[in-house]
Amino acid sequence: MLLNRYTHPEMGKLWQDGYEYERWLEVELAVAEVMAKRGEIPFEAMEEIRAKAKVNPKRVLEIEAVVRHDLIAFLQAVVEEIGEAGKHLHLGLTSSDVKDTALSLVLRDSGRLLKKDLQALRTALVKRALESKYTVMVGRTHGIHAEPLTFGLKLALWIAEIDRQDERLDQAIVTVSAGKISGAVGTYANVAPEVEEAVCKHLGLETALVSNQILQRDRHAHFMTTLALIGGTLEKISTEIRNLQRTDILEVEEPFAEGQKGSSAMPHKRNPIVCEQVAGMSRLLRGNALAAMENIALWHERDMTHSSVERVILPDSCLLLDHMLRQMTRVISGLRIREDQMKRNLQKTYGLTSSQRVLLALVEHGCMREDAYAWVQQDAFQAWDNGIDFIEVVSADARVLKYLTKEEIQGLFDLKYHLGHVDDIFKRLGLEA
């Protein structure tokens, strides 16, 4: 399982051996109770099983070292605790009836915890978006200054994507929340379909309509690709913060704690290490998602090529994403937004970010678009190449002055023009202060 360095207690608990054994026992007890109600095992035996059944993880591992089968070792350890009545456990079942159904419980609970993490990140994003709703900065396309926007709009974009990921996670949780109690090849030869239905209902799981020895791995691949998609969004956010924290831009900075150090050699360094960590971890999520898709195609009614893979990728991806979401929430909550630097950066291109406004104004006043584009481009390049304010070059261009007065040109460089629909965009997201 993942290094303790990246494991938080709540999610870590779900993937400990002891928790897994408890879920196996939960499934076994649910089957026994349903069978007792159906008269398939003595009710008195069921009461004794319920009273005495418990799991000793240490004992399970001792037995497994001999039998080399985790579920058999688990059953032996539990039956040792129960005594004679233990013979009524696991009747008509195959190991995967228990293990796959229990795994669905763990994945469901993990998904719910990740959803809580995702909502915490959204809350942090909303708070900062409202704070910086009108904080003007330059927008960049291809890494080059384009037109002004606000930092709040950048955050709003991330919020909308988080909302889509939240919907995907809901669906992935539903998909993976399925159980099967159908026997060795899915024919219910030794256990009735009604037992499966009752057990799954008791556990809060969907009953798989058809299964073989296992639950089909497209369900798990769906869950894992969803986690990778969420990781992609976190990488997107972290990469943007890293780029905006470049010394040459320096419009935002991730939190830097008192006493923290950025380099063993250079005392001045404040590196975006949390965002770098998140970006790196997203690669693991994508790799694990690919491995999950490789698990879909198995031989006949089941082989075990998926098992060893899942022992690594399922806990690791859940633990990774839990950590990534928590880290990103911390970054957003403590993000330093440098409005003064955003204003300075806006001026670095001498007002060229208003070029489209000048173009459109010329066209609106009767100029042919091709002519207007050529004139504005020539003026823009002259301003850039000579370090002159774009407004000065445009205001001195006789071709432009045939269509626009100097007062009209001055108005084209008002930054407020670019903020006219900020409120509308926020309202679409349901974000109002």
Image: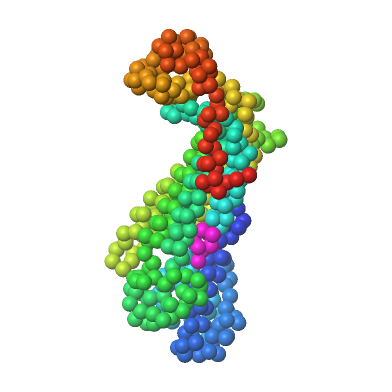
Is 4 on the left or on the right of 178, as rendered?
right
Q: Nearer the viewer, residue 324 or 77?
A: 324
Figure check: 383 above or below 248: above
Highlighted magenta segment, given as a residue range? 105-112
Q: Residue placed at 47% from the left, 61% from the top?
A: 173
Figure check: 73 above or below 120: below
- Identify the colour scheme used: rainbow
Q: Residue placed at 43% from the left, 81% from the top?
A: 195
Is 227 on the left or on the right of 16, as rendered?
left
Q: Nearer the viewer, residue 94 or 135?
A: 135
Is 417 on the left or on the right of 364, as rendered?
right
Residue 107 among those drawn in magenta: yes
- Which quadrant holds residue 346? top right
Give the residue at the far left of this rendering: 300
Give the residue at the far right of this rendering: 258
On the image, the x and y values in percent for residue 37 come to: 49, 87
Q: Main secondary structure of the magenta part?
A: helix
Residue 16 among those drawn in magenta: no
